[in-house]
Image: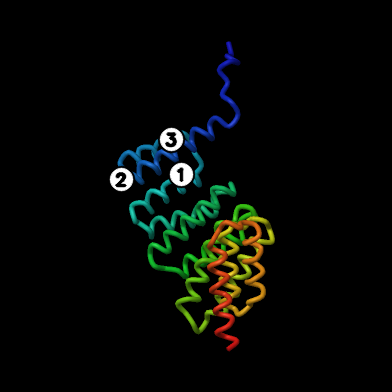
């Protein structure tokens, strides 16, 4: 006779597979690579999708500092996984793996692909990270700094306009606007922050730097 009381709740299998994958990554992070591989084998035996298995395998390889192999699997995952949250994680992890290889250009390409392919609400961290890389490149490549800052400005303004911004987003936007000599726009961003968070001293400091910079350039 069928036992109706024994039925698993909806989503139970997915939760179990997610827990096994998380355990595999945690074990790898703790240096227990043999145990991590055993959990990955369990994940595969339980019929997890190839995308889920490849993502966990890529995470383990990345923690082992096998970045070439990890990147190859992450790129494979981009075409295997449809879940936006998993895809978002894969793009971020792949970009970090590229940065660990000191390959900023590859990291930028990966993040741009993520921004293009992910739904708006799932691409927030990719845009934040990409804007940060653009600012780093602007600081190190003075000849093309304006181009990099302009790209960072576009990304940060998209986040602000969509409502997915943080205090750090707007502080970075003010920094970028100042670098592009858009002083009034930078001042407006900082004044809005001062009004919203009057006890946070960071905005006063950045406003002071902004005014000093403005006086220096106008004088």
Q: Residues within 10 Å of mark 3 (few under 14, many from 20)?
A: few
Q: Return the residue at label 3.
A: 45
Residue at position x 55%, y 84% in the image: 216
Residue at position x 33%, y 44% in the image: 30
**Residue 90 coordinates in the image, percent (x, y):** 50, 53
Give the answer, above or below, for where 29 lies relative to 5. below
Q: CA distance from mark 2 to mark 1?
A: 19 Å
- Disc 1 is placed on an element classified as helix
The residue furthest bottom is: 219
- Disc 3 is placed on an element classified as helix
- Disc 2 is placed on an element classified as loop
- From the image, state whether disc 1 or disc 3 is nearer to you: 1
Q: If you read the primary sequence from the N terminus, does the residue marked by circle 3 or circle 2 appear first?
A: 2
Give the answer, above or below, for where 54 lies relative to 178. above
Q: If you read the primary sequence from the N terminus, does the residue marked by circle 1 or circle 3 appear first?
A: 3
**Residue 58 coordinates in the image, percent (x, y):** 42, 51
Residue at position x 58%, y 83% in the image: 215
The residue furthest front is: 199
Is residue 30 or residue 140 the one in the foreground? 140
Q: Which label was assigned to residue 53?
A: 1
**Residue 76 coordinates in the image, percent (x, y):** 49, 55
């Amino acid at each position: 006779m069928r036992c109706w009381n024994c039925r698993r709740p909806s989503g139970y299998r997915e939760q179990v597979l997610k827990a096994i994958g998380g355990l595999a990554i945690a074990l790898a992070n703790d240096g227990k690579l043999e145990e991590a591989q055993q959990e990955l084998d369990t994940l595969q035996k339980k019929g997890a999708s190839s995308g889920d298995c490849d993502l966990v395998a890529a995470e383990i390889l990345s923690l082992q500092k096998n970045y070439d192999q990890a990147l190859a699997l992450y790129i494979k995952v981009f075409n295997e996984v449809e879940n936006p949250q998993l895809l978002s994680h894969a793009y971020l992890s792949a970009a970090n793996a590229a940065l660990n290889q000191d390959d900023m250009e590859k990291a930028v390409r990966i993040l741009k692909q993520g921004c293009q392919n992910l739904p708006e609400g799932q691409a927030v961290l990719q845009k934040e990270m990409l804007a940060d890389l653009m600012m780093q490149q602007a600081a190190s490549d003075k000849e093309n700094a304006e181009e990099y800052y302009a790209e960072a400005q576009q990304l940060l303004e998209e986040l602000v306009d969509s409502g997915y911004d943080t205090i750090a987003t707007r502080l970075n936007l003010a920094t970028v606007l100042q670098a592009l000599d858009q002083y009034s726009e930078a001042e407006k961003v900082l004044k809005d922050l001062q009004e919203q968070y009057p006890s946070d001293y960071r905005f006063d400091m950045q406003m002071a730097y902004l005014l000093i910079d403005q006086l220096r350039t106008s004088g």
